[in-house]
Amino acid sequence: MTLEKQLIQKTYYKMFINEHEDMHPIRVLGEVFQEEAKQDLPDLSTIRFAQGEVYFHHKDFETAIFKWENIINELEPWAKKNTGDAYYELGLLSAAEDIYCAIASEDPTLKTEVALKLFSLYIERGKVEAAVSTIKKTIVANPDYPNVTEIARNFFEERQDWENAVELAVTEAKRTDSLEWFEILNTYIKKGVTKHHAPSYFSQALILLFTLDKRKFEELVSSLWDSYKNEESYFTWLSEINHLLLNLELSRNENWSELSRLHKEHYFSLIEGRYFIKVLQDFIPDLLTNWFRLADDSNVVVASAAVLSWNELFPASISMSIVSEAEKLISLTETDMDELNECLLLLDSIMSWAKKHDMGENNHIKWFVRQLVDFDTQHLFITGLSGTGKSTFVNTVLGEDLQDSPTSSMVMFKHAPSLEITEITDREVTSLPEFADFQERMDRRRNALESIIEFNQPNGFLQENKVAFIDTPGLKGNPHYDRYEVLKNLHVADSVLFVLDANAPFTEKEQMALKQIQELAPDIPVHFLLSKMDTIVGEREALRIFDETRVSIHSYLPDARVFAFSSQYEGGQQQELTAFIHSIKKTRNIEDKRLAKLLYFIRTTIASLLQKRIDVENQLVESIRWNEEMLMKLNGAVNQLKDTEVQKTQTIAKSFRAIKETIEKDLSDSVRKMLQECSSLIKEDSNFSKIHLELNDEMNRKIQAYLEQTVMPKFYRSLQEWIEHGKEELEQSQEFLNEMGDGFNHMYGEERLKLECDFKVLDDWRRDTDRMTSRFQLESINILLRRTPAQFLLKSAGKLFGALSQNKAMLFNKYKAFVENEDYSEAIAAVNKQFFQPFELFEKSLERDITLFFRSPLNVLNDSVEEAREGIQTNQEMLNKMNTNPEMFRDPLTLFDVRLRQFEWMTIAGKGMQTIY
């Protein structure tokens, strides 16, 4: 055992007891101490050091400390370290720390041992930062010291200090070239604890690992790629790893299957439409270059196609040597790619993107695709000028009158186990449950060409011949655009059956239409059906017309077939028609032809979506302008309505007030006269001590009778007339609002605004006026018992004279004169106050009632104002977004075009073709 190990393990004492193994070490060392002490220059430090070790092992730490404190030779630093160990074992950690920190030595072993003890001490004392700092300094100073890196790794992992754990793994991997440390690093990466490190942090380690073990290199790159793919640093990683790979000697022969898979997977995820091209073009060229360099056999064709398609979009972005090699490889290498599936996946990606970005459901395209992948059915596109007998032919062949009027939409008749009729527009798919619904759709003319009707039902002819009829609206001779709207769906067909009228076959207009068909779809064969043959008189004439027509057709289309058809359907003709259908069916290479059509639809879809973006922008501009105009008109309507409400409130309230004031004036005059006339009730023999009470009661009775029998009926009649007048005023307002609503609905193009007022207010008025004029109970009024001076004197005089019973004539005259000449203003005011109180409350409620009358239309208009305002804001925000980021729409579609071009490159793989530009 070396001296260092003895010092570390505290077994230095064994040097003194090798010959005395049967004796206790304390005794042996004691005897050695005594012998050494007898020397002239004794060296007792060494023996004391050994004695301290023995006491330490026997846990006599205080004695061990005593021994080690008296060491003055070269063992002194170790003795101090051992002293610290003894204090540590005694639990005196602070003292131990002071001793450890005071040790000064250049011995790397001692320094490392002291550092490890301090490390353990700091952990025990909870000084984590000090422990981390100590172990990291120890590794820097003496990384090869036994177990020091293992101790550090365990410490970091236990504390989940992944920052330092990763740093340790990377540092040691680069320092030692040890695959074990690379494996440890890989476990950290898979745990997801490295994703916050910059990708460049691992570059040097990756370069080193590439030289050590290429398979381990591929594993580590794969782990890092997976860890960064959902992080903000993903693009930084892509740039870093591709720059690194460009500088490595990669060979396709080394079978980089995992790296090839990663490049393929992430390349396609990058170009699926989520990112802008300005973001991608910085690193896609390097990504494709590296993929091409390391692509395995299963990916070399797709990698080559990706290089070529990207190079078409950004010429010179990829090295020409790589592009040339890709062209060479793709022309010589065959692929077993499922072309149809790849094509459908691309189309599905486009449709999903379009839906996500509010570009419509694109149900037409989806319907076309379903027809194209139905390889068991041939699609016969039936067209011709209007009035040539197309619908008659379809009805006759299918055995029932499916159409009793000219076709307005494109209709596909197809065999199915049960009847199922569906209308397809770009926006929605609608089931038509009844045949009557189908007829109603066929009778519709507005926007009819926007619909496709799929008519599925059991049909023996269609089933036997495995064919579907696509009937179209009749072509107009002119203009060109109308014909295009009918023929724009031509590519769904496998063959075209052009219907001619035998009475005027193959006219100049038909030749013009035929020319347009050939321009739109030159690869789709066109055949002809000569209809209405039963209208030709004589078999010889019919044969002549047929032969001449066929010759004329063949001068344009030599391979076209012509079938003479009569609506007088006979069994023989059915057999001939079946034979004709079979003769024009093209089943050879149908998969390749349908695939070509799918590619056509993808390309036209991309183009249409690009145009749709422009259309959307124009629609937004128009919508903003329209909403601004509507907002101005709606605000004007709101102000008009409020003005009308104020005017009607004033008119109706003024009318009511006039009636009330008239009644009030009549009542005042009549009551005053009635009370004055009560003087006739005073007689000379009246009991003047009570006459004022009797008169007061009688006056109240007369007023009550007058109010009930005269005033209230008259008031009731006046109020009924007022209600009728109010009704006329309110009906005028409703008429005005109806005209306003019709005007707005005309501008909206739909019945959106219903400006209906609440006429229940009239019922409320009738009920309230009936209640107020049906009964009134006057509370007794002190007419002659009030405290006016005249009344007081008269009342007092009555009592006085009554008591004295003299001079009744004078009192009679006084009383009579008073009653006849009294003004009764206070009494009349009291009567009016009682009688008119409910009418005054009713008058005050008129403004509220009329407000309620207009509330609903006002709310409708205000809602429309808010809707227009929100429409302006929403559309303006969207327009600003589109104008600020035009690439938001353009770039994804451009990338879809790249994918399409890539797919087209792949379709020629192994066919020796150098280019398909």
Image (cartoon, rainbow, N blue to C red):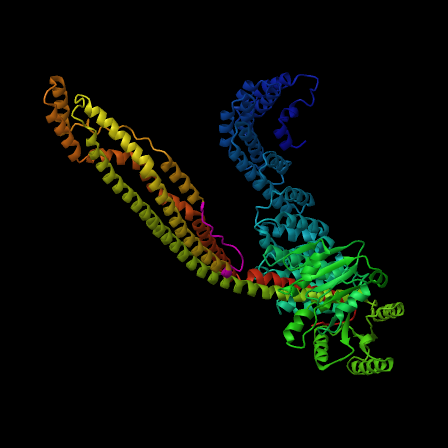
Q: Nearer the viewer, residue 916 or 70?
A: 916
Magenta span of residues: 746-759
Q: How many marks?
A: 0
Q: Is residue 753 magenta?
A: yes
Q: Name the spot of residue 867 as percent of width and height, x first.
A: 48, 53
Q: Work out which quarter of the rendered image holds the C terminus and state it.
A: bottom right
- The answer to whether residue 152 is seen in the rendering is yes
Left or right position of 632 against 61 = left
Name the image quarter holding the N terminus: top right
Residue 30 x/y as whole percent: 60, 17
Quarter residue 8 falls in: top right
Apparent side of residue 13 relative to residue 877 in the rendered image (left or right) = right
In the image: residue 875, left or right of residue 709 = right
Reply above or below: 339 against 731.
below
The prevailing secondary structure element of the residues shown in magenta is loop
48 in the magenta segment: no
Q: Place residue 479 in its image quadrant.
A: bottom right
Q: Measured along the vertical axis of the image, is residue 347 above or below residue 806?
A: below
The structure residue drawn at horizontal position 31% and vertical position 48%, both measured from the top left corner, is 654
